[in-house]
Amino acid sequence: MRLRVTSPGLLALPWERPLGEWDATAVPLRDIPVGPSRHLVRFVETDGRLWALKELPHRVAHKEYAVLRDLESMGLPAVRPAGLVLHRRDGRAGAGREVPDGEGNAILVTHYLEGSWQYRRLFMRLPNRPRHRARLFDAMAGLLVDLHRNGVFWGDCSLANTLFSRDGQLLQAWLVDAETSDVHPSLTDGQRRHDLDILVENVAGGMLDLAVRLEQPPEMHGALLDEAAGVAERYTALWDTLYDTPEMPFSDRLQIEGRIRALHELGFAVDEVRLEPAGTEDRLRLHVAVAERRYHAEELAALAGVEVGEGQARILIGDLRAYQGLLQQQSGREVHDGVAARRWRTDLFEPGMDRAHAAVGRAGAPVQAYCDLLEVRWLLSEQAGRDIGDEEALAALSLRFVPFDAAASMAVAERATGELPRLSPDVLERMDRVEGEAGP
Ligand SMILES: Nc1ncnc2c1ncn2[C@@H]1O[C@H](COP(=O)(O)OP(=O)(O)OP(=O)(O)O)[C@@H](O)[C@H]1O
Ligand SMILES: [Mg+2]
């Protein structure tokens, strides 16, 4: 047994028994619906935290644990490993036959990914809009690009092996299943293409499976398959933006600037710009070394000491800058960044976050609720042709009176983790029914 987290409640669990035999009346199991999965996955709450436990054969478990640790050390978006428990016997403790090393089952423990959703939940609860699907596929393409940039071959990228969390108007995708993954110093184009083919095939399968479950007409299937194929295009577009090395005339500064701006827009900070001679005398080749996708997140952290996701930071910086403009207008003087950031935090951000979170019934993250408020206010003001103000926007948010395509409408899939019921067969059945009925 190897646990990296020494929370007393976690240590006290009946690790010697197969996961399937854990007794829901004695162990604090939590009912969380999971996607299609081969292995048994159960969730436990101890010492105020949630853990995901997955039972799988020794060898695979070792490998997955090692890969997840690598991903964690590279700061990649994946579930975080917390421990690995190996069973030496093939049945109940003491009763079963002792198994040789490398055989038998293991339980892989990961930190439950707070605020994340399974794609099924997302699709079943959301209005069935291409805009929402586009967000989800952008997130998947972005995740695969992140992994590939760091030499990680996923091997089984699918909707069921990805979790999604909200990040401003975007979604962030997380790798949840690394059984088939390998970490290399870097990947060849062939490896990347292979991984991408797997993704397209799996996503197409996942979409069709869902369409059937939701009883969508077969005419829709072709469009869904096209959308799945579109993930590869999103991936390639992003990859090319990061790694293209265009040739340009010596004097073309604008193109360099344009390239850097485009990267910043996508959230990527630029580490280094290199210009190298390209064939003819007056032409150069532009190489850009791109850092992680945290451009706005780092700017906001430096300015205001607020640590959030890249998509959220982008929205918040816009809010901060607009407030800075207003303060300058009111005072007739320049207001420095530091002063503006402090005022923005205390005047707008902190109280606004609390009110927005209350308006959505305290579901999801407070900072996301504030981003939703800003989005709803902006969209409804645009519709109304005037600034509708915070009160109206808060009311719209709490009544879920939100434009269908708005990212804020994704809040319907959110549920506070505190509300997760204890596991029992009828809870399970009831939830399945409710999820099925809530389809688009
Ligand atoms: N740390 C976690 N936080 C939140 N949810 C999790 C976590 N780990 C697993 N899950 C949920 O459990 C589901 C199944 O997990 P996983 O994909 O790792 O196992 P599996 O499906 O049995 O493996 P395989 O894909 O080989 O069949 C995931 O889709 C996800 O919904
Ligand atoms: Mg899986």
Image (cartoon, rainbow, N blue to C red):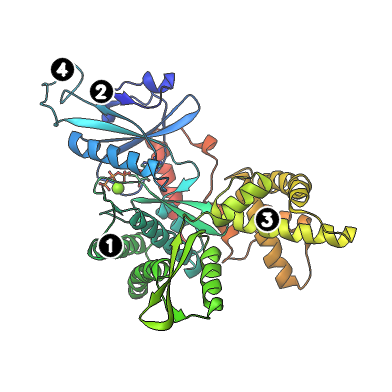
Report the amino acid beneath label 1.
Answer: Arg
Pointer 2 or 1: first along the chain? 2
Report the amino acid beneath label 2.
Answer: Arg
Which is more foreground, mark 1 or mark 3? 1
Looking at the picture, tell me which residue is in the foreground, 176 or 409: 176
Q: Position of residue 222 (x, y in %)?
A: 33, 75
Q: CA distance from mark 2 to mark 4?
A: 10 Å
Q: Which residue is mark 3?
A: 373
Dot 1 crowding, Cα within 10 Å, few <14, some 14–19, many 20+? many
Q: Residue at x 70, y 58 (%)?
A: 319
Q: CA distance from mark 3 to mark 4?
A: 58 Å
Q: CA distance from mark 1 to mark 4?
A: 47 Å
Q: Is residue 396 visible?
A: no
Q: Secondary structure at mark 1?
A: helix
Q: In the rendering, which numbered label is found on residue 261?
A: none
Which is more foreground, mark 2 or mark 1? 1
Dot 3 crowding, Cα within 10 Å, few <14, some 14–19, many 20+? many
Pointer 3 or 4: first along the chain? 4
Q: Which residue is mark 2?
A: 17
Q: CA distance from mark 1 to mark 3?
A: 39 Å
